[in-house]
């Protein structure tokens, strides 16, 4: 297969055959059914417990799929380069930048966005803490801050060290302001609401 | 972003075949590749997603550790054996990127990430690394973050990895697999100097996939990773130093030094290491080693400060490593 020139149609055919033979691997059947000649792929995404079947340009990031195809606009596009953290979601419970994931590479993952963390009637404890401590000003970075904080607190519980952890071999990680600031450095707040964000996270961790 | 096709092979055999397709590239965590595709500094026609290959394990091997290529930066830094025996590696990884990125970025991908030279990322500017023969915008441009060692008239970009600097003092090896077989490369031979062909970051052949990083038994002595950057967290190194110092009373039995942020590859300072072996323990000896480590360095204007900064950071890292290794 690798010795023959690959055309879009050829890849479609070989991909379908390959897909049938693989376990766990995945080749996406690609077609140009949008009429404009742009290639699209069928992608299944599980977001906040619900499964969705989407037809996407392969270039679609998870962030764009969430916002533009599923209407989940809580996750924000700040920089689109993994530098600001406004797009942070939980992928299989682990915090990641949704702008740096292709949607189709997430078809076997469980994605949780800010919309899936709590409800208006029953907010997630980290959401409650952000409200209580006024952990935001304009609010643009807040969904990413909260998703990141939820993932970060789970990392602390699992004993993951950070760059400021004094003893790498410590059995348990301390939930301290310096740790929270270091571990949340992937989430930028241009209003600089950091003192209240840190207070909210420490409170949510039961340390305030 | 240019159009591409995508597949996720189930095993290594399928992956090294799939990479033979025209314009194919391996996709690991994607934190750098996808970003580069957005600005079209990378334009793969086909992505071979290797992130689900069964290569994420970290296991004991010959007194050292075998780190699977898809082990994430977070998992590597948190591994209890790495934290106990190779703290310089854990510290280096934890000092890189953000929590979100470390959760996604892989060990193999970290080694193959590309420079953060802003001209490389800007398609409107000449860059020999992005478009061979187009020229280097950094030589006479803003070059504050650029190389002071090993640069050429074609490129003064630096390699951005913290992890690779630590791996250099640990004498790690990189295991690679291709359709024609498997081989091991010393970490210090993986990355290359730019010379006249800066578009090539590494000595890997087309189609070779990093499958593991092999750590030999940990070196004797104290291990330190010291990083100097513009921000306190989540920033690339202006200068970083990985140091190992083994003491014998008031003498230095052996020392190992590698620097990041100063060259196109992690820079092992072998002459400075030789100078320290057997020397009396003193701050002066470490300061002299720092000077030896930057011998021949050439500033390009905005980055002149890196030469003194690197020498002092080497000295400080050595002092800290020696203090850890109190007999």
Image: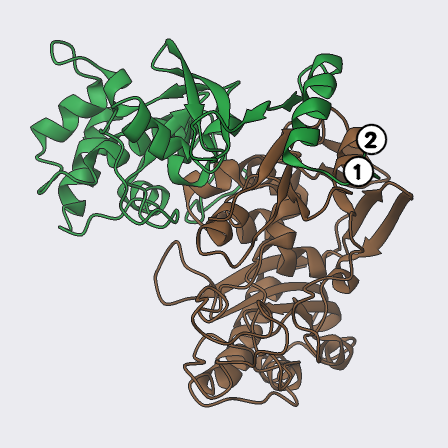
Residue B216 in sight: no
Q: Position of residue A33 (x, y in %)?
A: 47, 24
Cβ–Cβ below 8 Å for labels 1 and 2? Answer: yes
| Mark pair 1, 2: CA separation | 6 Å
The hue in which chain A appears in the rendered picture of the protein: green
| Residue A20 to residue B296: above or below | above
What quarter of the picture does the C terminus of chain B occupy?
bottom right
Label 1 belongs to which residue?
Answer: B16
Chain ID, mark 1: B
Label 2 belongs to which residue?
Answer: B13
Task: In the picture, one chain is brown; tell me its letter.
Answer: B
Q: Position of residue B213 (x, y in %)?
A: 74, 45
Chain ID, mark 2: B
Tell me the residue at 53%/28% (across/down): A105
Extreme-front residue of the structure: A35
Judging depth in this view, the residue of B231 and B192 nearest the camera is B192
| Residue B87 to residue A208: above or below | below
Dot 1: element: helix
């Amino acid at each position: 297969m690798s010795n023959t020139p690959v055309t879009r149609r050829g890849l479609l055919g070989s991909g379908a055959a390959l897909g049938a033979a693989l376990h766990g691997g995945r080749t996406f059947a690609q077609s140009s059914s949008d009429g404009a000649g742009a290639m699209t792929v069928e992608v299944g995404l599980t977001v906040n417990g619900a499964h969705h079947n989407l037809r996407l340009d392969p270039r679609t990031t998870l962030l764009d799929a969430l916002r533009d195809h599923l209407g989940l606009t809580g996750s924000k596009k700040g920089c689109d380069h993994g530098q600001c953290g406004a797009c942070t979601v939980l992928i299989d419970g682990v915090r990641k930048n949704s702008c740096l994931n292709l949607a189709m590479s997430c078809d076997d993952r469980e994605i949780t966005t800010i919309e899936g963390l709590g409800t208006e009637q029953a907010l997630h404890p980290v959401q409650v803490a952000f409200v209580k401590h006024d952990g935001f000003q304009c609010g643009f970075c807040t969904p990413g801050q909260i998703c990141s904080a939820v993932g970060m607190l789970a990392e602390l519980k699992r004993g993951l060290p950070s760059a400021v952890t004094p003893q790498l071999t410590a059995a348990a990680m301390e939930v301290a302001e310096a740790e929270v600031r270091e571990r949340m450095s992937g989430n930028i707040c241009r209003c600089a609401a950091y003192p209240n964000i840190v207070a909210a996270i420490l409170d949510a961790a039961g340390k305030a | 972003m240019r159009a591409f096709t995508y597949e996720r092979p189930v095993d290594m055999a399928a992956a090294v075949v799939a990479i033979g397709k025209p314009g194919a590239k391996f996709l690991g965590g994607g934190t750098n590749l996808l970003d580069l595709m957005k600005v079209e500094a990378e334009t793969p026609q086909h992505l071979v997603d290797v992130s689900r290959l069964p290569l994420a394990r970290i296991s004991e091997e010959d007194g050292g550790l075998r780190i699977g290529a898809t082990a994430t930066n977070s998992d590597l830094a948190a591994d209890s054996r790495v934290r106990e025996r190779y703290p310089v590696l854990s510290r280096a990884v934890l000092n890189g990127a953000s929590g979100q990125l470390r959760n996604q970025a892989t060990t193999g991908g970290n080694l193959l990430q590309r420079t953060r030279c802003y001209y490389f990322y800007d398609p409107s500017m000449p860059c020999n690394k992005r478009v061979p023969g187009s020229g280097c915008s950094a030589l006479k441009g803003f070059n504050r973050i650029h190389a002071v060692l090993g640069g050429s008239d074609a490129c003064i970009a630096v390699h951005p990895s913290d992890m690779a600097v630590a791996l250099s003092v640990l004498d790690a090896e990189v295991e690679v697999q291709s359709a024609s077989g498997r081989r091991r490369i010393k970490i210090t031979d993986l990355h290359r100097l730019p010379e006249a062909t800066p578009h090539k970051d590494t000595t890997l052949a087309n189609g070779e996939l990093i499958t593991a990083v092999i750590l030999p038994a940990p070196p004797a002595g104290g291990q330190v990773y010291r990083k100097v950057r513009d921000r306190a967290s989540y920033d690339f190194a202006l200068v970083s130093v990985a140091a190992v110092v083994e003491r014998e009373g008031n003498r230095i039995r052996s020392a190992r030094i590698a620097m990041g942020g100063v060259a196109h590859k992690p820079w092992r300072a072998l002459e400075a290491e030789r100078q320290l072996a057997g020397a009396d323990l003193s701050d002066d000896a470490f300061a002299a080693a720092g000077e030896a480590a930057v011998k021949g360095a050439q500033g390009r204007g905005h980055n002149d400060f890196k030469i003194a900064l690197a020498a002092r950071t080497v000295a400080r890292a050595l002092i800290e490593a020696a203090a850890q290794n109190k007999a």
